Amino acid sequence: MLTLITTARLNDVDPKAWLADALARIAVLPASGLHELLPWEWQRLRQADEPADQQAADLHVAPS
């Protein structure tokens, strides 16, 4: 467990968020997609999704 947490930290990934997501997804992810759960890949994929998530959030903000 310490190795997983340390690896996440060394890759500037929040260990709690990464482990929670990885453990939730590992059972339903095909073997060909397991690389997505590696901390550095997980972070890269999250960052790629952020602009789309932020843009969607900006669209839902009511004008003042």
Image: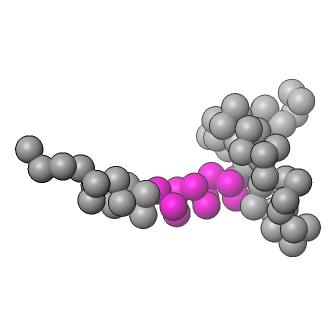
Q: Is residue 8 visible?
A: no
Judging depth in this view, the residue of 59 and 46 nearest the camera is 59
Seen from the viewer's position, the closer of residues 12 and 16 is 16
Using the image, determine if residue 55 lies above or below residue 4.
below
Q: Taking 63 as reference, is 52 left or right?
A: right
| Residue 37 against residue 14 in the figure, above or below | below
Return the residue found at the far top: 2
Q: Is 33 displayed left or right of 58 in the figure?
A: right
Residue 43: x and y in percent read 62, 52
Which percent across, then down, holds residue 24? 78, 46
Give the main secondary structure, helix, strand or loop, of the magenta stretch.
Answer: helix
Residue 9 image point, x, y percent: 69, 35
Residue 61 at x, y = what percent? 24, 50
Q: Is residue 16 visible?
A: yes
Query: In the visual, does 54 lie left or right of 31?
Result: left
Chain part drawn in magenta:
40-51
In what quadrant of the picture does the N terminus appear? top right
Q: Which residue occupies 88% across, 54% down? A: 27
